[in-house]
Image (cartoon, rainbow, N blue to C red):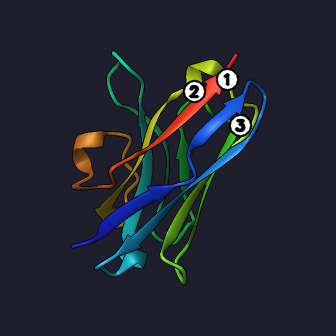
Amino acid sequence: QVQLVESGGGLVQTGGSLRVSCAASGGTFSIYTMGWFRQAPGKEREFVAAVSWSAGNTAYADSVKGRFTISRDNAKNTVLLQMNSLKPEDTAVYSCAARLGSFISTMAHEYPYWGQGTQVTVSS
């Protein structure tokens, strides 16, 4: 069973950049598809981005396409989310998630493993 720990959240101004990281342990990282989800206060959790186990395939929510980039380093058991041109509506708790296999899913319930989340706040 894989354990996930996020880091790198914080406060940034509109238009700024931030990178959040997710460190995995306790499993064979390379066989998991990794995803990032976010949840703002009073809103449901939403898909942000995902990367397949081989990093050959990625997927992004329309709201972040062109601004966010997901990547992974299987040698370091980490997945990164580089966030550029941040907007106040990007403010949320960002959580990484893992699921076995190479299929990229945008549905939170298809990811059985989750980190605790890291807060990202974008000020206007």
Residue at 77% over, 34% down: 16
Question: Can you see residue 82?
Answer: no
Residue at 57% over, 52% down: 8
- Nearer the observer: mark 2 or 3; the answer is 2
- Which label's residue is closer to the chain start, 2 or 3? 3
Residue at 24% over, 48% down: 110
Residue at 30% over, 79% down: 27
Residue 68 position (above or below residue 96): above
Residue 99 position (above or below residue 66): below
Dot 1 amino acid type: Lys
User: Based on the displayed image, in which of its 4 quarters is residue 6 positioned?
Assistant: bottom left
- Which label's residue is closer to the chain start, 3 or 1? 3
Q: CA distance from mark 2 to mark 3?
A: 11 Å
Residue 67 - label? 3
Q: CA distance from mark 2 to mark 1?
A: 5 Å
Residue for badge 2: 90
Dot 2 amino acid type: Asp
Residue for badge 1: 87
Task: Classify mark 3: helix, strand or loop.
Answer: loop
Rendered location of residue 24, percent (x, y)? 40, 71
Rendered location of residue 30, percent (x, y)? 43, 77
